Image: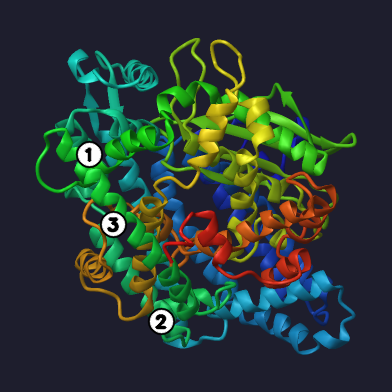
């Protein structure tokens, strides 16, 4: 199977033959893939013919195809179904892959060929997509240090290698802490919890071989427990364990990893001639500069904080009314906020949840994609990497568009969070290649025979990740390097956050929000209450997010902190962080920032994209409704199918005619008045 992993396989839809792949196959396949890649790079760099777009840029596109094929399978299964062997191999291959990439970018003969094409670009008669790929290829080489020589080049290689090791360690430490903690509950400790929380705790305990119900650090378990448990002592124990992930001392502590990571990123930026890592990282994003990011975040912070502080007064009074003393604490907020939501909106999560069945929400996401883009989804009986994963063939007008895989349930072998990834990306250079797209979530798995029920936030997550999937499914470009989600980080969240809006369309909920036992649709008055409460507790949600984004920016904007935890505490104090709200991601568990470079100095991007997604959905409303066909066609043409074929701002302006301001975001979050 080693050779098949790098050379391909003959299977239905070209899906990986998971049943025939063992953990022992990955290491040799990755090593072989790098060797083949090195040989192809040497051929391209040493070609005696003058550089052309075909023999250099297009040749580079396929140079590491075998390695990419093996890695795509390995990375997906390592994140979604980790084993000791896979974790060990990840630690082994991370520095190897960093060194392999450094070899390519340091190949002076190869860079000279790229530079020759760049110098002659106006005479090459390139298509717009080819011109874009040439620009991005050259920029990638320069930003990777291709122009550096001597010590600077060697040091940059070592820095990147060490960063790859640190990112892997951070991820694995966090997963280890999440696996290690559990809180077993006896029957009296279940009192006051809704049936669905008890059922999920029992199912988790059974899966773990415990003697009874168990709460773990899976978000789908711990958040409902914090919302509903009347036992303040248990809420405190759960919250403190959740907040301590990555900071428990010992071998899995991430604090020193965070410090070294920030130090090395600053050195990397300095070697490349940038004032800070923030300047380096944001150069290629829509925001462009740290100042632009800070401006957006601070414009949102003040009204959000004002709303949160007003809410804190109300919640504290409710807590004191229960006979509790002292200030509202982080383990109290969700509990009293849930009680207040029931008071203010007559909305009870326990009453709502039976109407949000996982199966029906999947159907809803598919149905919206059908009405908007004509996509159809048919279940596939194929072998996948885990029994919980499921697959569908995606077609349009009879044409195969993609294979979509959904892996929805939490398990100890899966890292926390939710994400979209691919086994294969869309491209046309190697023939008509359609993508294999994977959505991974962490919803609580029900007991045998019981339906999986989602919170409204879970349902929103499902729609969010499916928005990313549509960006891959509808991609229609020639080159894999710019297909699908290969766009600026602060643009990549636009399709996903925009798609969340369709969950809030009343006719969608009216059709698909049906009761798990009776099959009856959600009552109209409940639907109205749900939508009326869509911005409920938005002060809390915005504060916990923006605090994390501002800390991320500050970490990378100046000199690296000697003690990131101290700097985090000082920043939160300066900002006036409400006592009873914790950062959404504190430093030792901030995987977006420290598990790799993807969202480093980029956590703000969700909010940057939200400015656009609020404005983009308004385009549908202005055009006559959420399923307006002309607006959907424009969205597909200029956003979902275009990948990174043009600058993100150009694509958005083609869709909308202009760039938006933050007013739509504040209005959508119910914070415009607070501003």
**Pointer 2 residue:** 276
Q: Position of residue 582 (x, y in %)?
A: 28, 52
**Residue appearing at x 64%, y 34% in the figure:** 405
Between residues 317 and 106, which one lies in front from this camera angle? 317
For label 3, the SS is: helix
Circle 3: is it few (<14), some (14-19), or many (20+) Cα within 10 Å? some
How much space separates mark 3 and mark 1, taking CA atoms?
14 Å
Indicate the quadrant containing the C terminus: top left, top right, bottom left or bottom right: bottom left
Between residues 197 and 130, which one lies in front from this camera angle? 197
**Residue appearing at x 49%, y 54% in the figure:** 669
**Pointer 1 residue:** 318
Between residues 600 and 193, which one lies in front from this camera angle? 193
Question: Does residue 669 appear left or right of residue 232 in this picture?
Answer: right
**Residue appearing at x 51%, y 35% in the figure:** 530
Is residue 223 something one can see in this rendering?
A: no
Q: Quadrant of residue 164?
A: bottom left
Q: Position of residue 202 (x, y in %)?
A: 33, 16
Indicate the quadrant containing the N terminus: top left, top right, bottom left or bottom right: top right
- Which callout, 3 or 1, points at the residue further toward the start of the chain? 3
- Residue 309: mark: 3
Tag in front: 3 or 2: 3
Circle 2: is it few (<14), some (14-19), or many (20+) Cα within 10 Å? many
Q: Position of residue 428 (x, y in %)?
A: 83, 55
How much space separates mark 1 and mark 2, taking CA atoms?
46 Å
For label 2, the SS is: loop
């Amino acid at each position: 199977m080693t050779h098949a992993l790098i050379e391909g396989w003959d299977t239905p839809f070209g899906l990986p033959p998971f049943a025939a792949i063992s953990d022992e196959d990955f290491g040799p396949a990755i090593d072989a893939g790098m060797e083949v890649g090195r040989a192809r790079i040497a051929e391209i760099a040493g070609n005696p013919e003058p550089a052309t777009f075909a023999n250099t840029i297009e040749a580079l596109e396929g140079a590491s195809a075998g390695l990419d094929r093996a890695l795509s399978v390995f990375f997906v299964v390592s994140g979604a179904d980790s084993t000791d062997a896979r974790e060990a191999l990840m630690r082994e291959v991370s520095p190897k892959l960093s060194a392999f990439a450094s070899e390519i970018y340091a190949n002076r003969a190869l860079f000279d060929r790229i530079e020759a094409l760049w110098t002659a670009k106006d005479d090459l008669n390139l298509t717009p997509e080819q011109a874009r790929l040439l620009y991005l290829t050259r920029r990638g080489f320069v930003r990777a240090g291709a122009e550096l020589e001597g010590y600077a080049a060697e040091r940059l290689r070592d820095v990147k290698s060490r960063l790859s090791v640190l990112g892997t360690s951070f991820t694995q430490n966090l997963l280890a802490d999440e696996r290690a903690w559990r809180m077993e509950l006896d029957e009296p400790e279940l009192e006051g919890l809704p049936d669905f929380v008890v059922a999920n705790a029992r199912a988790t305990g059974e899966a773990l071989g415990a003697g009874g119900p168990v709460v773990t650090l899976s978000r789908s378990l711990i958040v409902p427990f914090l919302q509903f448990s009347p036992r303040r002592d248990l809420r405190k124990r759960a919250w403190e364990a959740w907040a301590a992930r990555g900071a428990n001392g010992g071998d899995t502590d991430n604090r020193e990893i965070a410090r070294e990571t920030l130090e090395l990123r600053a050195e990397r930026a300095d070697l490349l001639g940038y004032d800070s890592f923030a300047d380096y990282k944001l150069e290629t994003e829509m925001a462009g500069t740290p100042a632009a990011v800070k401006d957006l975040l601070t414009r949102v912070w003040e009204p959000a904080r004002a709303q949160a502080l007003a809410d804190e007064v109300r919640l504290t009074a409710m807590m004191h009314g229960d006979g509790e003393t002292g200030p509202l604490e982080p383990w109290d907020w969700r509990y009293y906020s849930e009680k207040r939501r029931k008071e203010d909106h007559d909305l009870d999560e326990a009453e709502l949840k039976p109407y949000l069945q996982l199966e029906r929400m999947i159907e809803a996401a598919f149905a919206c994609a059908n009405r908007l883009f004509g996509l159809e989804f048919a279940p596939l009986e194929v072998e996948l990497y885990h029994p919980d994963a499921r697959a569908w063939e995606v077609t349009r007008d009879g044409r195969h568009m993609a294979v979509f895989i959904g892996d929805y349930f939490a398990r100890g072998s899966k890292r926390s969070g939710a994400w979209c990834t691919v086994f294969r990306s869309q491209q046309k250079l190697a023939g008509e290649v359609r993508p294999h797209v994977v959505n991974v979530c962490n919803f609580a798995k029900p007991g045998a025979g019981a339906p999986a029920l989602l919170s409204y936030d879970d349902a929103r997550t499902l729609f969010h990740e499916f928005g990313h999937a549509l960006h891959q499914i509808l991609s229609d470009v020639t080159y894999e390097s710019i297909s699908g989600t290969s766009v600026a980080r602060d643009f990549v969240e636009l399709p996903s956050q925009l798609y969340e809006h369709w969950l809030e369309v009343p006719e969608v909920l009216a059709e698909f929000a049906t009761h798990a036992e009776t099959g009856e649709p959600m009552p109209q008055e409940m639907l109205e209450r749900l939508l009326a409460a869509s911005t409920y507790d938005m002060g809390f949600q915005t504060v916990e997010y923006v605090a994390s984004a501002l800390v991320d920016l500050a970490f990378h904007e100046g000199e690296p902190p000697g003690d990131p935890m101290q700097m985090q505490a000082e920043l939160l104090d300066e900002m006036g962080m409400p006592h009873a709200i914790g950062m959404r991601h504190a430093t030792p568990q901030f995987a977006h920032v420290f598990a790799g470079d993807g969202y480093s100095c980029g956590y703000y991007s969700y909010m940057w994209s939200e400015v656009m997604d609020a404005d983009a959905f308004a385009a549908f409303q202005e055009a006559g409704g959420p399923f307006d066909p002309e607006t959907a066609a424009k969205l597909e043409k200029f956003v979902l199918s275009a990948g990174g074929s043009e600058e993100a701002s150009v694509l958005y302006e083609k869709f909308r005619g202009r760039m938006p301001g933050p007013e739509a975001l504040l209005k959508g979050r119910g914070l415009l008045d607070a501003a």
